[in-house]
Amino acid sequence: MKGYIFDLDGVIVDTAKYHYLGWKRLADELGLRFTAQDNELLKGVSRIRSFEIILELNGREMPAEEIEKYCTVKNEYYVQYIRRITPDEILPGVRGFIREIRREGIRTALGSASKNARTILDRLGLESYFDAVIDGTMVSKAKPDPEVFLKGAEALGLDPGDCIVFEDAVAGIVAAHNGGMKAVGVGNAEVRECCDFFIPSFSGLTAAVIEKKLGL
């Protein structure tokens, strides 16, 4: 394989808690019920769709322009939280794994639905670890549509079939497969049955192990 494409949330760093805090703060202000369990339904989906799910859980409807307005408010809350992220929050083994595969000549891309991906990479000090960054400002279709990963492969100058995707969400695994790529599931046990190979973390992992397990 010539290229590895990484999702951000749950793969490089766990920002789910900050998304939850942002949505919870907004929901409380609007008198909407929203729990940590509800938050699990928002994994891997767009910001607007996330708010639509929260509204549906509460039997509420809003005009599209109001939904857009409140999504902007939530993002402002979220950005306040992620500006406090430090490199200590990088998930175990990630930095060493990416550094090693780059030494081996494997090209790397970030493929995330987050519109704040570059801010997060900057806070983590990981910008130089990726040859390309495809974020939510560059795509119009949410996973399981493969757009974000196809654009990642294109930005690396590679065919999709020459890339491996690392994902922690079922929608992301399906998106990778829809794009003709192998998918490694990371951390989240829910992806075990749909990914091509599962890893609990990147600790002690090498490209050789990944590709052997994928039969490459």
Image (spheres, rainbow, N blue to C red):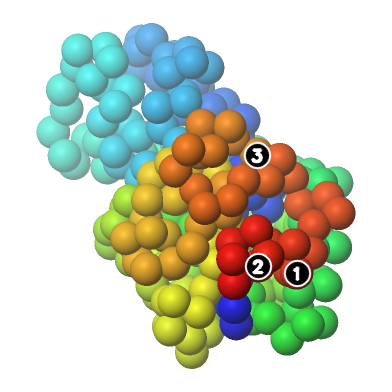
User: Residue 211 shows which numbered tag?
Assistant: 2
Residue 109 at what x, y percent from top left? 58, 72
Which residue reaches farthest front? 215
| SS label for mark 2 | helix
Q: Position of residue 59 (x, y in %)?
A: 19, 12
Residue at the bottom extreme? 157
**Eyeballing the image, is 71 above or below 129?**
above
Q: State whether residue 72 appears in this view.
A: no
How far apart are labels 2 and 3 at the CA level? 18 Å
Q: Quadrant of the C terminus?
A: bottom right
Residue sitting at x 52%, y 74%:
163
Label 2 vs label 3, nearer the camera:
2
Q: Amino acid at mark 3?
A: Gly
Q: Amino acid at mark 2?
A: Glu
Q: Is residue 19 depicted above or below 181 in this figure?
A: above
Q: In which quarter of the view is residue 65 placed?
A: top left
Q: CA distance from mark 1 to mark 2?
A: 5 Å
In this picture, residue 123 sits left or right of residue 72: right
Check contact, mark 1 vs mark 2: CB within 8 A.
yes
Q: Position of residue 43 (x, y in %)?
A: 45, 36
Which residue is disc 3 drawn over?
Answer: 187
Q: Which residue is label 1 attached to?
A: 208
User: Nearest the camera: 165 or 209?
Assistant: 209
Q: x, y percentage for residue 174?
A: 37, 51
- Front residue of 209/136: it is 209
Q: Is residue 63 left or right of residue 71?
A: left
Residue situated in front as seen by the camera: 53 or 30: 53
* Circle 2 crowding by C-alpha within 10 Å: few under 14, some 14–19, many from 20: few
**Residue, x 65% and y 59% (percent of image)?**
213
- Residue found 48% across the figure and 69% down from its top: 134
